[in-house]
Amino acid sequence: MRTTPRRAHGAGRALSRAHGMRRALTGALLAGVTLFTATGPAVADDPSASASPAGEEAGPTEAGTTFRTATALKQGQRGTAQASTGDYLYWVFPADAGQRPTVEATVKLPESAARSGASTWQIDVYDGLRRRQACQYGHQTRKAAADAATVELSCVLRTVRSWSEPWANDPLPGSYYVRLTVAGLPAEDLGLPFGAEVRAASKEQNGAHDVDGSLSEPLVPGVSIAAPGDANASAPRTPTTAGPEDGWASGWWTDRWLWTVGGGVLAAFAAVLGYSLTRGRGRPAHVPPGV
């Protein structure tokens, strides 16, 4: 059986159309994979994963002894202090919406010869309303043996939300207080000198934890502390804790925009591909052009 030129021409056009659709489908799949893999995972709740510092810098060399005298600490800084066993040490750092803060502390214990027994150390984290925040992961309380030189503590908080119900205890944007103290030791060891190092850092959780709402003001000290009858109630208040270097969030950007745009691009590719497939199947390959 001999193939006529007209049939050969139609078969060639069908083959070319099939190759074109295959290329379009491959391009759409590659574009989608590239877009979604570039955004990274929305949630990574690995208990062993700690916040990666963006560049550690020298921090303060002292700590406060109350909430009001807490020493300001930027995220990524390492604060140090020397104190006596039994003292309460306080630091305060800012955390914004979408961040999951991690607090790490190292206690350099007194010489073992001066200690009479084991001791238990603990760190607690409070938000701007001085509500104690629970740790998702980490070693918030640890016992140090009588001959131990150091003890490591850590606390991974829940992701900071941009808004929450008044009755909830969700972490909100603002200041976060770190309190380090000894929770148990022999009475004769009270007053022995020890050293402390504290560091706070956050991991961005992106739009997976976004909610429809935001605070009018972050929960930082000094924002709304005037009494109703105070003559200076309308005067601007200067927070005692500096906020993030790039300002508090409450902006329009979120990685949800990437997912929305990516979905639109994939939908457009799917529409073009579907139209091409439908048009190609509706026209017999042996019918010459123009008929």
Image (cartoon, grey):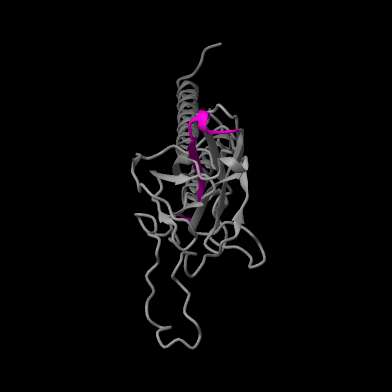
Q: Locate residue 54: give its quadrant.
A: top left
State the quadrant of the N terminus: top right
User: Can you say whether 60 is above or below 9 in the image?
Assistant: below
**In front of the other: 261 or 277:** 261
Seen at 40% across and 39% down, the residue is 53
Q: Residue furthest right?
A: 167
Residue 102 in magenta stretch? yes
Seen at 41% across and 83% down, the residue is 234
Residue 254 in magenta stretch? no
Q: Locate residue 147: give its quadrant.
A: top right
User: Which residues fall within the magenta stretch?
Assistant: 94-116
Seen at 45% across and 46% down, the residue is 83
Looking at the image, can residue 1 be seen? yes
Looking at the image, can residue 205 be seen? no
Number of marks in picture:
0
Residue 4, given in percent of the width and then of the height, sits at 49, 19
User: Can you say whether 135 is above or below 18 in the image?
Assistant: below
Q: Residue furthest left?
A: 58
Residue 58, given in percent of the width and then of the height, sits at 32, 43
Seen at 40% across and 61% down, the residue is 241
Q: Is residue 54 left or right of residue 262?
A: left
Residue 284, given in percent of the width and then of the height, sits at 56, 32
Residue 14, given in percent of the width and then of the height, sits at 50, 27
**In front of the other: 115 or 33:** 115
